Amino acid sequence: MPHASLTTNKMADDKEDDFIDYLDSIKRKEGVEKNEALAAKQRKKWRETTWAGMLVATVERIGAAPFFEAIGNSFEEGETSTSFYLTSLLYKIGLITSSIIFVYMIGWIMRMIMGEEIVVEQEVVIVEEVTRSQVEAEERAAREKSKKEGKPLNDVPSKGHASVRNRKSKREAS
């Protein structure tokens, strides 16, 4: 019968072990519940006190959370999926657009500080070289024209450069 007592001892030990395991599982469940309650409390505090938390709460309130969850789940397929490619493309376009808008905003702020736009003006001076023969040809053409029209010769420019003629006529007038 020593054999029977051994089996009963083993059964008693098994029952004790089962009971101890049961108590351990209850303690673990209580610990998990306590941790979940603490995490929920911290999550609530995070949503009320931070910008990111408020944004998440707003997204959940307007009902867009399933949309973002679907996008997140699509990334699990990896970089070869179409949704990943489209999302990364939209991200890049958004980044470029926001960079351009940022540059325009900085320019607008600088313009507000400086008062107005900076305008670069350039003066273009065209220097024309006139030869004596060209001046004489113009004077001849003017005399011939005045002879045909019957104007007096005083109105016809004399030989020489235009500035010389203007100085002569100014002296004569005074």
Image (tube, helix red, strand yellow):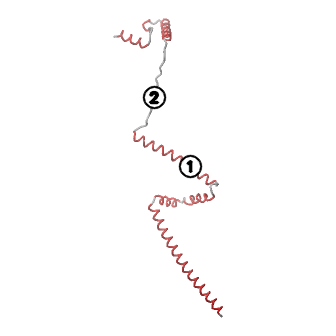
Indicate left or right for 172 with 70 as reference: left
Q: Position of residue 142 (x, y in %)?
A: 48, 9
Residue beneath label 2, please?
Answer: 122
Q: Identify the residue at image location x=48%, y=14%.
A: 130
The disc labelled 1 sits on which kind of residue?
A: Lys
Query: Splitting the image into 4 quarters, where does residue 3 fall?
Result: bottom right
| Farthest-out residue, front | 2
Residue beneath label 1, please?
Answer: 92
Q: Identify the residue at image location x=44%, y=10%.
A: 160
The disc labelled 2 sits on which kind of residue?
A: Gln
Query: Splitting the image into 4 quarters, where does residue 114 fall?
Result: top left
Whole-angstrom CA distance, mark 1 to mark 2, is 40 Å
Rendered position, 22 above or below 88: below
Q: Position of residue 67 (x, y in %)?
A: 57, 58
From the viewer's side, name the closer residue of 155 and 104: 104
Label 1: few (<14), some or many (≥20) within 10 Å?
few
Instruction: Give the structural element (helix, strand or loop) at label 2.
Output: loop
Q: Identify the residue at image location x=61%, y=54%.
A: 84
Assess whether mark 2 and mark 1 are in contact (beta carbons under 8 angstroms): no
Instruction: Give the structural element (helix, strand or loop) at label 1.
Output: helix
From the viewer's side, name the closer residue of 112 and 27: 27
From the viewer's side, name the closer residue of 139 and 130: 130
Q: Position of residue 169 (x, y in %)?
A: 38, 10
N-terminal label among 1 and 2: 1
| Farthest-out residue, left | 174
Indicate left or right for 74 with 149 as reference: right
